Image (cartoon, grey):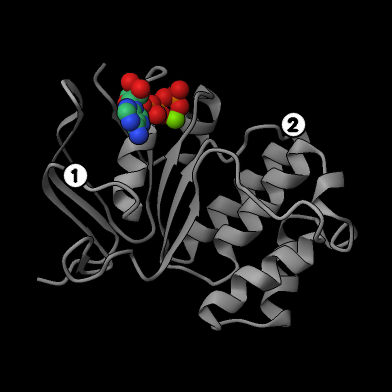
Amino acid sequence: MAQNGILVEHVYKAFGREAVLEDVSLYIPPGKILGVVGGNGSGKTVLMKCICGFLKPDKGMITVCGKRVGKDVDFPESIGIIIETPGFLPYQSGYRNLKTLAALKGKIGKKEIMEALCQVDLLENRRKAVARYSLGMRQRLGLAQAIMENPQVLVLDEPFNGLEQQGVKEARKLLWAQKNQGKAILLASHNAEDIRELCDEVFPMEV
Ligand SMILES: Nc1ncnc2c1ncn2[C@@H]1O[C@H](COP(=O)(O)OP(=O)(O)OP(=O)(O)O)[C@@H](O)[C@H]1O
Ligand SMILES: [Mg+2]
């Protein structure tokens, strides 16, 4: 059956002898935010990379928007991703970076990019080289990139890293808005308040 959102079924992943994911199952329906919590090295990022198709699980099945990752598609089609610190071309402007990335799929143009920049409050700084961005500005650009193509699911690994209090508030609002638009969102955060404020459900990783 086609299943919207993010479905993870009995996923296992080990590196050598080190088992990182052991029988992980979860489901995030459209319009819900699931928070994944756990200490350093508990496997949050590995789980996210498996969902995005960057790592292949040893066992189990991951389905995103009704398509099995690694079977029906190599990578989920409608996904916005922040994993660890987003990488951008430092000597190009924020706007140019997004334009280059948008050109890969050719789904969106200037209007959508400007809207995304506006949502993360980067319009004024869009012409500045990313090398001259602060950490928080780079993180905002990462958020803009994640949402600009209006994907149905979002996988966000510590998306509020480096944001000051006001920035965190705005980013939370942005995620609420995304949720209310029916996005299925997986969020990893070490910040208990982010998790409490934003998440409909919490998934604790076992260490
Ligand atoms: N490519 C890899 N090769 C080998 N081991 C890896 C690889 N990626 C992750 N690991 C191991 O998998 C475990 C889980 O790592 P992961 O990055 O998922 O942790 P995390 O929960 O995201 O931690 P943090 O809170 O620090 O971000 C760690 O022990 C890590 O060393
Ligand atoms: Mg991590």
Amino acid under disc 1:
Pro
- Residue 153 vs residue 137: left or right? left
Mark 2 is on which residue type? Answer: Gln
**Along the line of sight, the residue nearer the viewer: 193 or 48:** 48
Rounded to the nearest angstrom, the CA distance separating label 2 from label 1 is 36 Å
Looking at the rendered structure, the secondary structure element under dot 1 is loop
Q: Measured along the vertical axis of the image, is residue 111 above or below residue 34?
A: below
Q: In which quarter of the image is the N terminus?
A: bottom left
Badge 1, how many Cα within 10 Å: few under 14, some, many 20+?
A: many
User: In the image, residue 146 lies at what x, y percent?
Assistant: 55, 59
Q: Which of 121 and 131 is in front in this view?
A: 131
Q: Is the residue marked by circle 2 packed among few (<14), some (14-19), or many (20+) residues within 10 Å?
A: few
Q: Name the residue under label 2.
A: 165
Q: Please state the horizontal and vertical placement of residue 156, each as a whole percent of the image.
A: 48, 45
Residue 154 image position (x, y, % from top left): 44, 55
Q: In this view, does 145 lie to the left or right of 91?
A: left
Disc with the residue nearer the chain's start (2 vs 1): 1
57 vs 68: above or below: above
Residue 129 position by quadrant: bottom right
Residue 144 at least partly seen: yes
Q: Which quadrant: the C terminus?
A: top left
Q: Measured along the vertical axis of the image, is residue 161 above or below residue 120?
A: above
Q: Residue, x 67% and y 53% (percent of image)?
A: 88
Query: Which label lies toward us, 2 or 1?
Result: 1
The residue singled out by tag 1 in the image is 57
Residue 111 percent location from the top left of the image: 72, 81
Quarter of the picture for ligand 2? top left
